[in-house]
Image (tube, helix red, strand yellow):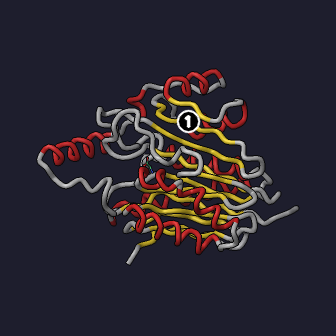
Amino acid sequence: MNNSPTLLIHGGAWAMPDDAIEAHEAGIAKAVEAGYALLERGASAVDAVEAAVAVMEDDETFDAGRGSFLTQDGRVQLDALLMNGENLRTGGVACVERLKNPIHAARLVLDHSPHVYFVGTGAERFAMQHGMRLIDNTELIVPRERERLMAFQKAELEGATDTTFSGPLGSHDTVGAVALDCNGHIAAATSTGGTLSKAPGRVGDSSLIGCGCYADDASAAVSLTGWGEPIMKLVLGKWAVDRVAAGVSPEEAAESAIRYLYHRLGGYGGIILLDRHGRFGLAHNTPRMAWGLKTADAMQVGVTRNV
Ligand code: GLY
């Protein structure tokens, strides 16, 4: 098979302020180029989504890798998942504090472990045993996020309404990618620092199979961003790919997933979905979502706005 490859990525769905748009668009463009360059050279969809996500983890703009939101106690705790639609091989890590690129650790789990998911120090030890360098958690923290946490916690003490978990305005800047390679296989990857001021040890949807990420050649590849708890309760990634398996187009499945998220649990988020025919969909009910798409014929990078 010699398919024309496709890469679709997102850099978070939230109430992105005007002055953050340029950085998001630049980061998305860089990630799309990195991932698509691999697909053009015949690399696998798994390689492409890993590469695109790693670029966004390295970019402080996004809530993934360095620059992520901080936990209640001022640390960075990262979650990531990578899934290969060809054979359902999957690798996930959660609550890692000492890895610059958790998506690379997820790849190591996918490639080298009979297990699927590692957390905390066990995940860090596994990554180190497979060649990754452990860093100090402070290397993942940027001043912007210390200030954001302080402002958030001060507002909480003053009794301000917390919309981070309940409204469309909270920040959900998780990154993700879905790809179709020239052999007709699809893959998905998602990586996040989670939600602002999360309790230490909290794991969101992003790295849980079927919640924030899923891929199966028989249906579709999906990555979500948004308020993790409702997405997890609905197992929304699997819900969406099952719609595609049942014959719904990715475009309609993406839109109905976000409608379901809102109507069933009042959740907010964004979704990207791609099937093995290159048909794709994206949707969000947050004020904005950053995303990028590259195919043989087109490259689009943008921040869409809900009216
Ligand atoms: N979607 C990111 C999180 O809730 O952790």
Residue 92 quadrant: top right
Q: Is residue 160 left or right of residue 31?
A: left
- Tell me: residue 130, above or below residue 22: above
Residue 283: image x %, image y %? Answer: 50, 69
Element under disc 1: strand
- Nearest the eye: 154 or 252: 252
Q: Answer yes or no: is residue 40 visible.
A: no
Number of numbered discs overlaid on the protein picture: 1
Q: Is residue 146 left or right of residue 257?
A: left
> Residue most toward the bottom?
307
**Percent of width and height locating residue 18:** 33, 66
x then y, percent, for residue 99? 51, 31
Q: Nearer the viewer, residue 222 or 238?
A: 238
Q: Is residue 92 visible?
A: yes
Taking 235 as reference, is 3 left or right?
right
Between 181 and 300, the one lying in front of the other is 181
Residue at the location (54% across, 51% down)? 211
Q: Quadrant of the C terminus?
A: bottom left
Above/below status of 169 relative to 46: below
Where's the N terminus, which quadrant?
bottom right
Where is residue 180 drawn, in percent x and y?
72, 60
Q: Residue at x 29, y 36 (%)?
A: 72
| Residue at horizontal 75 percent and vertical 68 percent from the top | 277
Q: Nearer the viewer, residue 66 or 110?
A: 110
Query: Label 1: few (<14), some or many (≥20) within 10 Å?
Result: many
Q: Looking at the rendering, which quadrant does residue 70 occupy? A: top left
**Please, which residue is most extreme toward the left here?**
158
267 vs 189: above or below: below
Extreme right residue here? 1
Q: Residue at x 33, y 63 (%)?
A: 168
Name the amino acid, label 1: Val
- Pointer 1 residue: 93
